[in-house]
Image (spheres, rainbow, N blue to C red):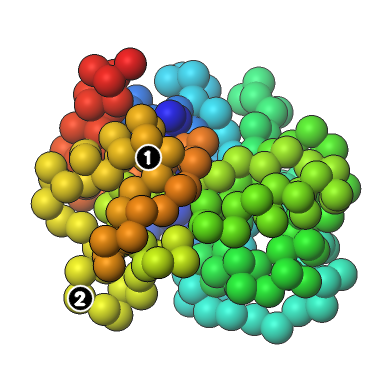
Amino acid sequence: MKLNCDLGESYGPWRMGQDEHVMPLIDMANVACGFHAADPMVIRQTVALAARHKVEVGAHPSYHDIVGFGRRSIVHSPEEIQALMLYQLGALEGLCRAEGLLLSYVKPHGALNNDMMRDATILRAVMEAVRTYHTNLPLMIPVTTHYRRHQELAGRVGIPLLLEAFADRAYDDQGQLVSRKLEGAVHHDPQRIVDQALSFATKGGITSVNGQWLELPADSLCVHGDNDNALAAVRAIRDALQSAQ
């Protein structure tokens, strides 16, 4: 079970996250491409840090929404979505090449990620953009109870698919993340976070907030390292996964 984290989200003098501390603990870095965060120097520095620690670099593209950090939905045609995706993938890979790396995968950010999981037209546009860029480039999406349907669509489009889960978030009976607006949506107890990570890794699923077993076979766990408590949780998850091997 690989760990991934959203990184490279600083912008000019504005610093966000603790990238230098979390990078050694993860396997996959989802690097902002400039549309919701990051600038060319931040991107290159993040890619260089990933290269130093032998971490895979994935593109973390979004709607063009710096002010809203990519968390606001913007209406686009499928063609526009493909264009904004291709623009960001090309920019990030240019900086990856400067550090001797290539893109390993794509993981959409924020509202774009949420919208594609609700709208099959948007999801297909995202998939087709990835295929146009490189046919062997995997797309990472959240795992839900509909994962087989998503795998079939990816197969028809012609791209590999990676399924992502979250150790620190509650899931409803449909395998969707519980809204952050609701109490209990985010786990704060370190042991509960570790237990959920182990359940994904060893059992291929977890129990929903209503006690229903969910088959959710994930390829990667998303973790966060933007504060000291989050970093401690990442270390605990890493240690637990290594002990379970």
Q: Quadrant of residue 93?
A: top right
Q: Secondary structure at mark 2?
A: loop
Residue at 80% x, 63% y: name it. Answer: 125
Mark linked to residue 108: none
- From the image, which quarter does the C terminus lie in? top left
Q: Residues within 10 Å of mark 1 (few under 14, many from 20)?
A: many
Q: Which residue is mark 2?
A: 183
Q: Nearer the viewer, residue 230 or 159?
A: 159
Q: Amino acid at mark 1?
A: Phe
Mark linked to residue 200: 1
The residue lying furthest to the front in this view is 212
Q: Amino acid at mark 2?
A: Glu
Picture coordinates of residue 38 (x, y %)?
Answer: 51, 54
Picture coordinates of residue 152 (x, y %)?
Answer: 76, 50
Residue at 34% x, 25% y: name it. Answer: 24
Q: Residues within 10 Å of mark 2 (few under 14, many from 20)?
A: few
- Along the polypeptide, which appears first: circle 1 or circle 2? 2
Locate residue 32 relative to residue 243 in the image: left or right.
right
Q: Is residue 186 visible?
A: yes
Q: Secondary structure at mark 1?
A: helix
- Distance from label 1 to label 2 (Cα)? 22 Å
Residue at 83% x, 55% y: name it. Answer: 128
